[in-house]
Amino acid sequence: MSELIAEVEDLKLIIFQLVDKEYAIPVNQVRSIEKLEHITRVPKTPSYVKGVINLRGVVTPIIDLRNRFDLAPVEPSESTRVIIVGLEDKEVGLIVDAANDVLDVKKDQIEPSPEVVGIEEAEYIGGVVKQNRRLLILLHLDRVLQSL
């Protein structure tokens, strides 16, 4: 089991969508969920870093998760959101297709990430959550953010 979840009993997760998959991150790593606003481009950054925004006086880098996971780009829609996450001393915004839900999950519902070949985001997966008919991909945020 991932070190991400090893020390917890129950977990509250923010559920968001990219293409047709649902992803999850622990709510304690989420600072806020915002509508997409103007992003100021920053030269010489990786293609998945869209730029920065001024969020309540704090300059916050913005990552396009579709680009980070090598998924097809789409134009932002009314449901597009920026999830502001905090990890250690970093605060970063993640552009997602939609922020769907908050879910309470028991530790025994979280399974290790499957050995899957061909999934671009495999290195970022901290586990999977099966709940009813839903399959949620639990992201390992420090790996998603590690090259920033």
Image (cartoon, rainbow, N blue to C red):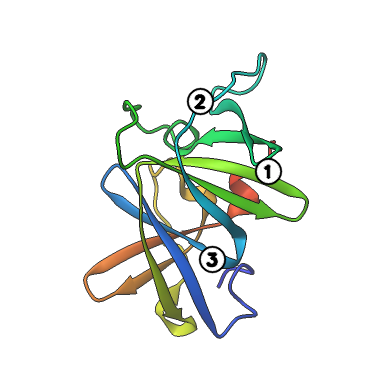
Q: Amino acid at mark 3?
A: Val
Task: Assess disc 1: are there few (<14), some (14-19) or many (≥20) residues with their C-alpha within 10 Å of its C-alpha.
Answer: few
- Mark found first going from the N terminus, 1 or 2: 2
> For numbered disc 3, what is the local secondary structure?
helix
- Mark found first going from the N terminus, 3 or 1: 3
Q: In the displayed structure, does residue 83 sit left or right of residue 109?
A: right
Closest to the observer: 7 or 26? 26
Residue for point 40% across, 72% down: 103
Closest to the observer: 134 or 92? 92
**Residue 88 position in % (x across, y down):** 75, 56
Reading the image, the residue beneath label 1 is 146
Residue lying furthest right in this view?
A: 89
**Residue 26 position in % (x across, y down):** 54, 65
> For numbered disc 2, what is the local secondary structure?
loop
- Quarter of the picture containing the N terminus is bottom right
Residue for point 60% across, 51% down: 85
Task: Assess disc 2: are there few (<14), some (14-19) or many (≥20) residues with their C-alpha within 10 Å of its C-alpha.
Answer: few
Reading the image, the residue beneath label 3 is 27
Q: CA distance from mark 3 to mark 1?
A: 19 Å
Q: Which numbered mark, 1 or 2, is in the foreground of this view? A: 2
Reading the image, the residue beneath label 2 is 38
Q: In the displayed structure, does residue 29 sit left or right of residue 35?
A: right
- Mark found first going from the N terminus, 3 or 2: 3
Q: Amino acid at mark 1?
A: Gln
**Residue 139 position in % (x across, y down):** 51, 56
